[in-house]
Image: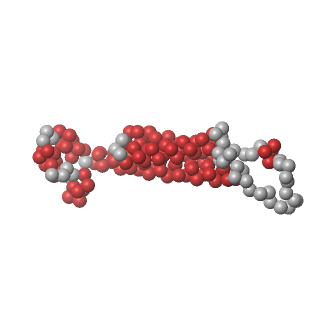
């Protein structure tokens, strides 16, 4: 098999990929709390998978009946620990990158909401559309096309 379901490092690498991917989607679709949770978990899983590394092969697995001649390198098989280590590293790094991207989106969202709290409070308290449009005055001119209320 290419992956070992009983290997904790491979399992954490797979969790990191899935958690980072879902954290990124939740961050994009404006669910920052869920994205923050999944992103933090994916970072934890990715780092722990990278620190653990691939599982070492057992001595009984290495001994085969068709041993190569002395001095020749054994043929590489798809299930060897070397190949699974590369897959583990790729999965863990991919999960780490997507999780950090999701966490940066969440941090940016919270920072913007903190810096422009007056604008968001005004929009939430506005009772009419014209009242919400009037809140655009609380934003700087370059940010109005991005965050402002459209008429």
Give me the residue at 33% from left, 47% from top: 109
- Viewer-proximal residue, 33 or 81? 81
Residue at image point 21% right, 46% down: 119
Number of dots carrying numbers: 0
Residue at the image position 79 percent from the left and 57 percent from the top: 74
23 or 61: nearer the viewer: 61
Residue 23 shows up from this direction: yes
Q: Where residue 146 sits: x, y (%)?
A: 26, 55
**Residue with the most extreme bottom position:** 71
**Spot occupied by residue 60 in the image (x, y as percentages of width and height):** 81, 43
Position of 6 with respect to 46 (left or right) is: right
Quarter holding residue 129 = top left
Let me know if residue 106 appears in the view.
Answer: no
Residue sitting at 83 percent across and 48 percent down? Answer: 64
- Asked whether 41 or 86 is in front, the reply is 86
Instruction: Determine the image quadrant of residue 1.
Output: top right
- In the picture as drawn, the residue positioned furthest to the right comes out as 70
Image x and y of residue 48, in percent: 59, 43
Viewer-closest of 22 and 123 = 22
Q: Is residue 29 left or right of residue 139?
A: right
Q: How is the image coloured?
A: secondary structure
Q: Would residue 31 be found to the left or right of residue 1 on screen?
A: left
């Amino acid at each position: 098999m290419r992956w070992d379901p009983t290997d904790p490092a491979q399992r954490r690498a797979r969790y990191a990929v899935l958690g980072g991917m879902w954290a990124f989607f939740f961050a994009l679709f404006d669910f920052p709390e869920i994205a923050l949770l999944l992103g933090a978990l994916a970072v934890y899983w990715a780092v722990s998978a990278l620190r653990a590394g691939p599982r070492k092969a057992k001595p009984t697995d290495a001994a085969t009946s068709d041993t190569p001649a002395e001095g020749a390198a054994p043929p590489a098989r798809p299930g060897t620990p070397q190949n699974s280590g590369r897959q583990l590293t790729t999965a863990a790094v991919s999960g780490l990158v997507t999780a950090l991207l999701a966490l940066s989106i969440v941090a940016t969202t919270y920072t913007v909401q903190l810096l422009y709290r007056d604008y968001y409070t005004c929009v939430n308290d506005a009772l009419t559309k014209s009242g919400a449009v009037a809140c655009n005055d609380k934003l700087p001119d370059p940010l109005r096309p991005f965050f402002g209320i459209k008429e």
